[in-house]
Amino acid sequence: MINEKVFFAADGVDGPAIDFARKLAGKHGIPELPAGSFPGTADFLLRADVAGLELRSLREPGAGPVRVDFSADAIQRRARDALRRQNLVRAVGTGVEVLDATAGLGRDAFLLANAGNRIQLLERSPVVHALLADGLRRAAADQELAPIIERMQLHCMDFRHWDQERRFDVVYLDPMFPRPDKRARGKKEMVFLQQIAGEGEESDLLARALACARGRVVVKRPPREGRIDAQEPSFSYRGRVSRFDVYLP
């Protein structure tokens, strides 16, 4: 379901980037604003220009936009910095077929694809899916990034509706679980995603993931957060920022 307080707007002359974004908005039923108009009830604006698609909060204009950019310095540093020794790749492995069941902005999926994995990405929020689809489109046009993007396939779908008969070597979960004592201090992107997509239910994610994983399920958590479904993992990789719990079916 689309958040009725999200609107689409195109800024500039129509071209490939704006045409692509407009088709995405139409596909997901995100209403487009006429040029120069401003709906007083809007919370977010999905804005397209010649550079691509971005999400802006109209209630917090100082927060700045959220955009998916796989060429950004931060993600490129991680992609170059001993990727195979990073806990994400140690937990998932390399050369495997991965289902990223909660894709979000796709950064972990990009790093896993860069490590040689093939990734199917599921994103249940139409707005977040549009941002991610636009980021993949731009990266696919980059000669250096295109081989990585070829290993990533995006679907707008809730994991709970995924065909359980198809199995993957690894199922990766990074659920937006409630963190009430930290939400006010959360990263801008996480706050926006929670407002747009909601926090979702964790209750059956692990069971579903285990049912369609041939090899393992990897769950990303903050270092001191409880286990998903309070179930003990087979083992974990712990870091300063994240913990990766590994469950063997």
Image (cartoon, helix red, strand yellow):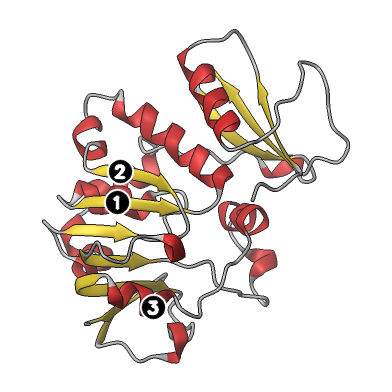
Residue type at the position of mark 2: Gln
Q: Given contact means CB atoms under 8 Å apart, are the residues at marks 1 and 2 in contact?
A: yes
Is label 1 in a helix, a strand or a loop?
strand
Is label 2 in a helix, a strand or a loop?
strand
Which quadrant of the structure image shows residue 102? bottom left
Label 2, residues with CA under 10 Å away: few <14, some 14-19, many ≥20: some
User: Is 18 on the left or on the right of 132, as rendered?
Assistant: right
Q: Residue at x 69, y 45 (%)?
A: 63
Q: Residue at x 80, y 40 (%)?
A: 42
Q: Which residue is mark 3?
A: 206
Q: Residue at x 52, y 17 (%)?
A: 19
Question: Can the viewer see residue 78?
Answer: no
Up/down of 128 relative to 14, above or below = below
Point out the tag, 3 or 2, that comes first from the N-terminus.
2
User: Is 168 on the left or on the right of 245, as rendered?
Assistant: left
Residue type at the position of mark 3: Leu
* Cα–Cα span, label 1 and label 3: 17 Å
Q: Which residue is mark 2?
A: 153
Q: Given contact means CB atoms under 8 Å apart, are the residues at marks 1 and 3 in contact?
A: no
User: Is 182 on the left or on the right of 152, as rendered?
Assistant: right
Residue 84 x, y percent position in the rendering: 16, 59
Residue type at the position of mark 1: Gln
* Cα–Cα span, label 3 and label 2: 22 Å
Point out the tag, 1 or 2, that comes first from the N-terminus.
1
Up/down of 166 relative to 152, above or below = below
User: Is 156 on the left or on the right of 110, as rendered?
Assistant: right
Is label 3 in a helix, a strand or a loop?
helix
Residue 83 x, y percent position in the rendering: 20, 56
- The residue furthest left is 95
Q: Which mark is residue 120?
A: 1
Residue 96 x, y percent position in the rendering: 14, 59
Q: Quadrant of the C terminus?
A: bottom left
